[in-house]
Amino acid sequence: MTDSSTRVRPDRRAELAAALAAVRSRIADACAAAGRDRAEVTMIAVTKTYPAADVLALAELGVTDVGENRDQEAAGKAAEVAAAGAAPRWHFIGRLQRNKARSVVRYADAVHSLDSVRLARALDAAATGRDRPLTALVQVSVDGDPSRGGALPDSADPDVGLGAVAEAVASAPALRLAGLMAVAPLGWEPDRAFARLAEVAEWMRAVHPEATALSAGMSGDLEIAIRYGATHVRVGSALLGMRPTLR
């Protein structure tokens, strides 16, 4: 059941339905152009700054996967949505501090932003006792800039080198290594970024054959990401509208 805080206006529902249809059409067209099966690509609705009512409306429209990037907002929103009777899969996609691990594992089905051995250990400890392992994607730093987050390909760093992070996740009992996530760096053309990511993903699958997921592409570049093998696209503004600037 819903209360006034989770009830969506009819005009907002219609707006979301139209945007969802357009995004689904874009994904289908991109898959067709790339010669891929549409079923290979999951759309994650990124609902940061938007209310639980929007999540519920999207769930009613058939959206099964929802992404959030700040635990303080996501934890309360997930509780509201659950109380209203909906159960989407929650993906945590933002940078994650180790001290938030215990909170995130209470509601998240997947974490896309795991980028260090220390964070892998914190999430593994926090997820111990869950009824199923926490799905984990290793975030890759496409440009190798450590200040932006992401494990570093071609690095032997024992905490943030991609090989070390992937191995830490793969060997963690409470985690399931699913694949990789990346954001195209500022100043990079999407083609360049996703081509580089595809190279890293090929290496990852050779070392960890189970790690087939590739979370890449957002509202503005999802077609290019799909061409380079994305299995999950994270769509915010094209679906929910332009959000206010986070402070």
Image (cartoon, rainbow, N blue to C red):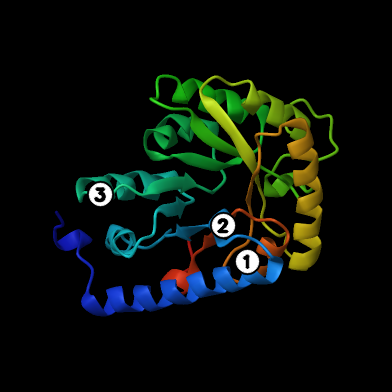
**Could you say whether the residue bearing mark 3 is in a helix, strand or loop?**
helix
Q: Report x, y in % for residue 23.
A: 50, 72
What residue is shown with label 1? 31
214 lies above or below 153? below
Residues marked 3 and 1 touching at CB (< 8 Å): no
The answer to whether residue 173 of the structure is visible from this angle is yes
Q: Report x, y in % for residue 116.
A: 66, 32
**Label 3 is placed on what type of residue?**
Glu
**Label 1 is placed on what type of residue?**
Cys
Residues marked 2 and 3 touching at CB (< 8 Å): no
Q: Residues within 10 Å of mark 1 (few under 14, many from 20)?
A: many
Q: CA distance from mark 2 to mark 3?
A: 27 Å
What residue is shown with label 3? 80
Q: Is residue 57 left or right of residue 168?
A: left
Residue 41: assigned label: 2
Q: Report x, y in % for residue 6.
A: 21, 60
Between 52 and 44, the residue placed more toward the observer is 44
Q: Is residue 78 left or right of residue 212?
A: left
Q: CA distance from mark 3 to mark 1?
A: 34 Å
Q: Residues within 10 Å of mark 2 (few under 14, many from 20)?
A: many
